[in-house]
Each structure stands twice: as C-alpha cells, then as structure tokens.
Amino acid sequence: MKAGIAVAVALTGAMASGQAIADGNKLLENCQQAVKAMDGGKDIEPMAVGQCFGMVEGVNNTMTILNSGLESKYRTCFPKGGISNGQAVRIVTKFLQENPALLDKPDAYLAMIAYKEAYPCK
C-alpha cells in the first residue's frame, strides 16, 4: 500500500508540475526526495517526487523504445522485463551522488548515462 501512495503522490506531482527540471543539481534534489518518500520518510516535497519519477520514467521509456534502433555500442541492456520506477530512481540518484562534477549537465542526459552505466551491454 505504501508503494501505491508513493506512486499516487509522484503522479500528482508530475501532472501538477509546470516547471522542467533543468540540470543534474535539481534532478538530484528531486530524486533524493523521491528516495526519501519510497523509504517512508516524512516531510517530503510531493512536487519534487513527481518531477523525479516523471523524468526517470520518461527517459527509461524513451531509451527502451529507441534501443533496438541504435548501434550496439550505444544500446543499454536493461534486464528482461525492464526495471521498476523505484529502481530507476535509485539508479539515477546513486549516479548523481557519485558524479557531482557532472551536475551542471542536462537532467535527461544524466539519467541516460546512469542507465547506461547500470546496464551496459556485454
């Protein structure tokens, strides 16, 4: 039930948001809120949670759809059946925390790199 509530909060935040996430700094801030929400934390910012979930799901879906049309060296080899939105948020958050020098880059670009590092093709 907690997951359902977190998803509802995230979707509400994503739908209500009119502001785009510009860079890795804002994406990290928002995704840290999402991780906090998933872990049952209090005093979360629903808009931030929604923006994070929206970004990571959008990039994940786009990469999954476009993957088959890319040259093999540019593909990301997601696990069969894909990954959950919660896993996606944790992957992106961890990547951003471990690469602070890249936080000035566009958010979607950073999410793509995070997935590619997490699921390289062999």
Image: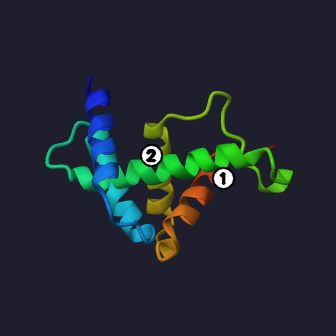
Q: Position of residue 2 (x, y in %)?
A: 26, 28
Label 2 to label 1, Cα distance in Å? 14 Å
Identity of the residue drawn at 34% across and 66% down? 19
103 sits left or right of 112 in the view = left
* Residue 82 appearing in the image: yes
Q: Position of residue 8 (x, y in %)?
A: 29, 36
Q: Which residue is mark 2?
A: 90
Q: Residue furthest left?
A: 43
> Quick check: marks 2 and 1 in contact, CB under 8 Å?
no
> How many labels were placed on the picture?
2
Q: Between residues 34 and 57, which one lies in front from this camera angle?
A: 57
Residue 73 x, y percent position in the rendering: 83, 55
Q: Amino acid at mark 1?
A: Lys
Q: Is residue 36 left or right of residue 105?
A: left
Q: Where does label 1 land, which residue?
A: 116
Quadrant in which the C terminus is drawn = top right
In this view, 40 is above or below 96: above
> Pointer 1: residues within 10 angstroms few (<14), some, or many (20+)?
some
One can see residue 91 in this view: no
Residue 72's mark? none
Of the pair 10 and 104, the residue shown nearer to us: 10
Helix, strand, or loop for circle 2? helix
Helix, strand or loop under label 1: helix
* Circle 2: residue type: Arg
**What residue appears at the point 81 percent right and 49 percent down from the top-left corner?**
69
Q: Quadrant of the N terminus?
A: top left
Q: Residue furthest right?
A: 71
In this rendering, position of residue 105 left or right of residue 30: right
Residue at x-position 50% and y-position 44%: 88
The image's colour scheme reads rainbow
User: Image height check: is 8 above or below 106?
Assistant: above
Marked residue nearer the N-terminal end (2 or 1) = 2
